[in-house]
Image: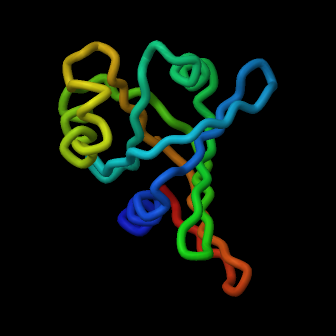
Amino acid sequence: MMNEVLEFLRDSGTFYLATNEDGQPRVRPFGAVAEFEGKLYFVTNNQKNVYHQMKNNANVEICGMSKGKWIRVAGNVEEDTRREARVAMMDQNTAALSSMYTVDDNLMTVFCFTSGIATISSFTEEPKTISL
């Protein structure tokens, strides 16, 4: 089931991550996801506001569209500081990430969903939910 979520987000190309900053929603585009040890991962720069927002409030939501359907992934995330997790992200997203990051640049930071629900919806089918 995790593969379905991963593939949907990859097919979306760009998906949007929502965080919270002092009660105000903050949404921005993302494009790289990976699977590592059975969990859904995404990447950011640890100097950005989004990094600090997730460290302060781990409750996030992702939304993306593909082929007339949309996905919402809501749950809690945590930073994974292991080099192996960054390597997995880079290996699965080399074209998108290699111009911005290196695995050991002290900027590339990966987060994974520790819990959550993915819901795939459309106007013509019943929603499908997948536990993370």
Marker count (numbered): 0
Q: Quadrant of residue 71?
A: bottom right
Provide residue 109's location: percent of width, then percent of height.
36, 25
Q: Is residue 86 above or below residue 7?
A: above
Provide residue 74's location: percent of width, then percent of height.
61, 49
Residue at point 56%, 60% (across, down):
118
Residue at point 61%, 21% (across, down):
53
Q: Nearer the viewer, residue 33 or 113?
A: 33
User: By what rule are the colours in the image chosen?
Assistant: rainbow
Q: Nearer the viewer, residue 98 or 43?
A: 98
Apparent side of residue 122 relative to residue 7 in the rendered image (left or right): right
Residue at point 80%, 26% (across, down):
24
Q: Nearer the viewer, residue 80 or 69?
A: 69
Residue at point 77%, 18% (across, down):
22
Apparent side of residue 55 relative to residue 26 in the rendered image (left or right): left
Residue at the extreme front: 99
Q: Quadrant of residue 80?
A: top left
Q: Is residue 121 above or below residue 16?
A: below
Apparent side of residue 54 relative to residue 89 in the rendered image (left or right): right
Residue at the extreme bottom: 124
Provide residue 3's location: percent of width, then percent of height.
36, 65
Work out which quarter of the rendered image holds the N terminus and state it: bottom left
Provide residue 47's location: percent of width, then percent of height.
46, 13
